Amino acid sequence: MQSNSKEPVRNEYLDQVREQQQRVEVDLKARKVMAPMQAQANIMPMRRAAAAVVAERTGNAVDVRVTGFWRWKTVIVPPNAYVVHTRRGHPQPLHIGLGVSFRFDPARDSFIVAPGAMQTIMINAHCICRELQGLLVQGYVQWIIEDFGTAYRKLDFTDAEDPMRVVNVQLREQAEAAIKDKVATMSIDAVLSDKQPIIEELTARLRHVAEGGGGGDKGLGLRIVTVQIKEAVVSSARLWESLQTPFRSERERVARLAALGTEEALAHRELEVEQARERMRLESDGELAMLRAHKSAEAYDREQSERLRRQQREEEDARRLAVEHQQSALQTAELQKARLEVEAELTRLTQEAEAEKLKREVLAQTEVGDVQRAAANRQSKTELELLETRQRILNELTPANVQARLVELLPDIAEKLPKPQELRSVSIGGSGGAQDGQGVATMVAQMMALMNILKVDGTARAPGQAVVVNTGGKEAKGELPPTPAPR
């Protein structure tokens, strides 16, 4: 039993971290190797089609193609790769830069190609902390070439399979050394809880080496992109258990105390609830008894009050009914009196209205008669004025005017005379007077005499006889006596 208790406990978490780290490294290495092989497999059919051009591949991990034959070759560099092209007799490179292709003479030229992509270094540093305990610090560093002109002089990129392998190994060693130095000054709790000091120290050291200390020192021509610490694992499983024990014990104590407190609180609460329930039951019984008594008293009082209220209500109804009968009789008498007064008033108003109507009719008839009489008077007055005017006109007529009027009416008189059956010729005025006025007067006088003759002879002469007047001739059947000319 004792031997079993002293056996070391296997740290499964540490094994898992190591296995994960190995898988990551294998995956990265596989991608670096498989990518060029796949690219070469994809372009092989195209190369077979171009038989006139001979293409060669270097053993470098960068996909560099060398085309041409013998001393007339061309090196084609991918756009994401750095290249340095030197020639015998030239102290400086002919071509240097990113993705620069050039003509290549194998007899005199040489070149180095390095990837321009960002590189990732996985770090597993087995450290000793200030308490002299083993720790495994896992992290990674990402870097990139910033100045290839400086980098190719100071770093080794000649590995045929991986030009960055040597540089990555060198940087990994420096990073592990920096981590170990920093962890040696820190406590195990600080390492496990706060990894920022390790990151800062590692970043400062790597940048000082890779980028230089400033001024004319350019370092290695590299640039540190990022530095991260992923894990810090205690190597000893027993120590790891011991480190976890205080926290777990504290958590167990807090949990147990919480459980006890909960049980105590529950028991106390149950007792309080039971007491409160009993108290509430007793209080409820007492309140129910008081409520029953109170309800009984209220019911009795309500019955008595209702009986008294009904009796009072009946008496009030009887009094109200008598008063209403009396008021109804008084109101009936008042209504009868008011009705008589209204009828008398209506009769008076009717009589007044009829009298007013008769008055208006009489006044209207009187006004109509006055208007008619006034109209008749105005008409009579107008007729009298007209007659007066005519009489005045007649009075103002001279014999000459009368004779002129008679001359105007002669055609109408002749038209109204009966058709003659006997013709008589009457000579009026054989010749005119010395003046036209005397001739007209003589003619009028003769016409008047003729009219008199016609009036006298109208009854003795048979109907149908006519008298022909010839001014200046003689009578055909009889001759009227001459009428003296008026003076």
Image (spheres, rainbow, N blue to C red):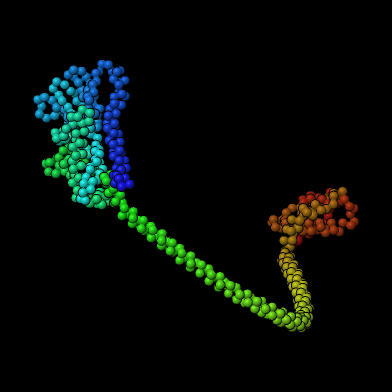
Seen as rendered, the residue at the extreme top is: 52
Seen as rendered, the residue at the extreme front is: 1
Confirm whether residue 83 shows in the render.
Answer: no
Give the image quarter of residue 443: bottom right
Image coords of residue 381 (percent x, y):
73, 70
Image coords of residue 120 (percent x, y):
25, 38
Give the image quarter of residue 255: bottom left
For the C terminus, the image quarter is: bottom right
Residue 353 located left or right of residue 132: right
x 23%, y 46%: residue: 134
x 31%, y 55%: residue: 246
Image coords of residue 138 (percent x, y):
26, 43
In front here: 50 or 419? 50
In front here: 2 or 349? 2
Above or below, 320 relative to 127: below
Q: How many labels sit on residues?
A: 0
x 13%, y 22%: residue: 108
Above or below, 191 relative to 330: above
Above or below, 334 relative to 256: below
In front here: 365 or 287? 287
Confirm whether residue 38 shows in the render.
Answer: yes
x 22%, y 24%: residue: 58
Above or below, 387 relative to 440: below
Image coords of residue 114 (percent x, y):
21, 31
Give the image quarter of residue 173: top left
